[in-house]
Amino acid sequence: MTTALALRYAKPVPRYTSYPTAPHFHPGVDNATYRGWLGALSDEATLSLYLHVPFCDRLCWFCGCHTKQTNRYDPVAEYLETLGTEVAAVGSLVAGRVVSIHLGGGSPSMLRPDDFRTLADRLRHAFTVDPAAEFSIEIDPNDMDEARYDALAEIGINRISLGVQDFNPTVQAAINRPQSFEQTKAVVDAMRARGVGSVNLDVLYGLPHQTVETVEATVEQALSLAPDRMAIFGYAHVPWMKTHQKMIDEAALPGIEARFEQSSAAAARIAARGYQAVGFDHFAKPCDSLAIAARAGRLHRNFQGYTTDDATALVGLGASAIGRLPQGYVQNQTPTAQYAREVALHGTAIARGVAFAGEDELRGYVIERLMCDFALDTADLTRRFGRLADPVIGDIAAIATDDADDLVDYRNGVLSLTATGKPFVRTIAARFDSYLNQGTARHSVAV
């Protein structure tokens, strides 16, 4: 891939885990709006729960999550009480069946064993949880001990996700994330021994001091653990949003061409082991449900990345958590103190959101299908949206006409991204984003 092509198309654009994207959420969507949306869900609705734990016992400098470091457990315990209150309040408002639960953060694995049990009990008391529900958690290996392994198994965790980043000590020191291969393997082995059926590993590229060689070495070590899924994420350097990223030496960050080389090398290594590419940054064993969904055109994308989750509603619980309902998006207060005050007053803590209007659902569908399938079928758009799809179909034709770099192929009403175009899917998706040039939001580069 030439430097010119990379520089031309790797411009800063959203990651498109929602549409409209989060910078366009506003305070006009509030607790009253949310309660109405929850109450409108039918008894047949399926629910996906995301619970956010915004604490870590150390702060990784690369992190882009809403979290903060604490060396005491008291703030965590107090937060869990507030979270339990929100769980009870939302559960009393919503009908339907929970088919997926995910604990994210921050570092949810820092919870004490009894707190895992209490939280799981509260969820199952407040909601109707399907016995076959996927129950997943993000794990920091530095948190884990035998008691936590046992507690996670006891509450029914059946999928785990571990951030590997890079096993190279120099890279780890540059991002304040010491984590050995041996620690990571110990977690995978311990959870598999307790019956966990699915393991996901995340590797980053674009970190300070990373090279193609360090990325390839990390990928090989990660593959030796036979993960069911792997994700290769590009580090998003956004110090204007996450001030702790200023601790990272920008001079040590690889440039755009180097990021492409690292990403391509990682993808080639994973594919050579028989993993199926899913979207532009995920991989899965061909027998995994994520790979099956991708082949069947049933892949989805949300704030957790690529997913099989097709629930009627994503219910976000905890500070900063985002939810998606049929009517639009909502997001909780981010500061934990404000979140606690709102929950104490209202039971819920919505700070902002956006109600779907105009072409939002159409354009959201177009962007999701492009990000998931690398293709858009104009006949499908017409069937789903009628004449409302006509302007978007015009945009599709214009993209094909303007293509001077073999990024797309357009025939029989289907726009498909070529091998050259797939790495730039975010940039191509941005052509359908009618909000992109509104406001002052800044984004990370699209590679």
Image (cartoon, rainbow, N blue to C red):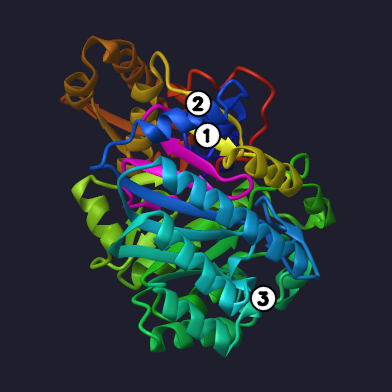
Residue type, mark 2 in image: Thr
**Residue linked to disc 1:** 330
Marked residue nearer the N-terminal end (2 or 1): 2
Give the quadrant of the C terminus.
top right
Question: Mark number for residue 168?
Answer: 3
| Vertical order, 91 against 368 (above or below) | below
- Pick whichever of labels 2 and 3 is earlier in the sequence: 2
Up/down of 158 relative to 78, above or below: below
Q: Residue 30 placed where, x, y %?
A: 57, 27
Residue receiving disc 2? 33
Choose between 334 and 64: the one closer to the eye.
Answer: 334
Depth check, mark 1 against mark 3: the one in front is 1
Foreground mark, 2 or 3?
Answer: 2
Callout 2–callout 1 Cβ contact below 8 Å: yes
Report x, y in % for residue 146.
Answer: 56, 89
Against 202, residue 337 (above or below) is above
Residue at 63% across / 61% down in the picture? 80
Q: Which residues are magenta?
A: 305-328
**Figure quadrant of residue 78:** bottom right
